[in-house]
Amino acid sequence: MTSEPVAGQAVVVATSNPGKIREIEEALSGLNWTLQALGAVPLPPETGATYEDNAALKACAAAIATHLPALADDSGLEVAALGGEPGVYSARYGNVGSDLERNVLLLDRLKKKTDRRATFVSVVILAYPDGHLETYRGELHGTLLEGPRGENGFGYDPLFVPDGETRTLAEMTVAEKRAISHRGLALAALMDAHRHGPPTRQTISVE
Ligand code: ITT
């Protein structure tokens, strides 16, 4: 039987990305869940074709291994002029090792392209040890600069200016980014579903 996370209960954060951990901890601080790191639990290879598939793979693996509810984010950057790439492959773009190298590669592929529109997508899944899943999705539209700006955040943040903003995501604080970002929006929906105590499985499920 699913046990809804309640105040003080441990929920595993199934990510190895420190930038995501910072954002998830900040966003969910109001829930009073005890967020627990993955520790030695290995994450499975991301073999899915969609963010939903990959988030479910990661969250379920952690929930099964720990017997605790587990939360995973699968996310990516969809670039209009590149037909939506790198998308679900954003973390492995070009098979290069660092965020900096991926940003250089992206800028190279966008050279001479006038269409700089891009969208960040985040799918957050909370998986229970019995296999029940809650799915939340957020998107953020913006444009890509021709060079990086800012030191905060991670990944493609230094290149991305959200619509209606002048700063890149890397020039914002964690709280400022959370208020508008793909991950912030997905986590806000999760917060809304869990804010008023333990609802029934049916009312919180958005599968
Ligand atoms: P985990 O699988 O361990 O969670 P990961 O970094 O491999 O970590 P993903 O497979 O979801 O996670 O890859 C998402 C990639 O998309 C991430 O590595 C960044 O390159 C990019 N990305 C996603 N959200 C981002 C954000 O908020 N800011 C900048 N880049 C982001």
Image (cartoon, rainbow, N blue to C red):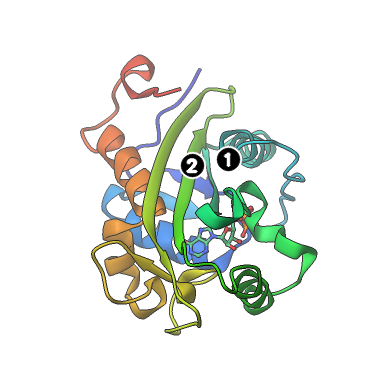
- Taking depth in this image into account, of 3 and 44 the one nearest to the observer is 44
Q: In the rendering, at what x and y percent does residue 80 appear?
A: 51, 53
Q: Is residue 23 above or below residue 148?
A: above
- Taking depth in this image into account, of 1 and 194 the one nearest to the observer is 194
> Ligand 1 is in which quadrant of the figure?
bottom right
- For residue 70, side relative to residue 117 (left or right): right
Mark number, residue 123: 2
The residue type indicated by label 2 comes to: Val
Residue 8 seen in render: no
Dots 2 and 1: beta carbons under 8 Å? yes
Instruction: Kindly tell me whether mark 1's CB lies below 8 Å from ligand 1.
Output: yes
- For residue 56, side relative to residue 114 (left or right): right
- For residue 128, side relative to residue 194 (left or right): right
Q: Is residue 159 above or below residue 48?
A: below
Circle 2: element type: strand
Provide the residue designation for mark 1.
51
Q: CA distance from mark 2 to mark 1?
A: 6 Å
Q: In the rendering, at what x and y percent does residue 164 appear?
A: 23, 64
Instruction: Kindly tell me whether mark 2's CB lies below 8 Å from ligand 1.
Output: no
Q: Residue at x 45, y 84 (%)?
A: 151
The residue type indicated by label 1 comes to: Tyr
Mark number, residue 199: none
Crowd band around label 2 with a 10 angstrom C-alpha radius: few (<14), some (14–19), many (20+):
many
Q: In the rendering, at what x and y percent does residue 134 appear?
A: 45, 29
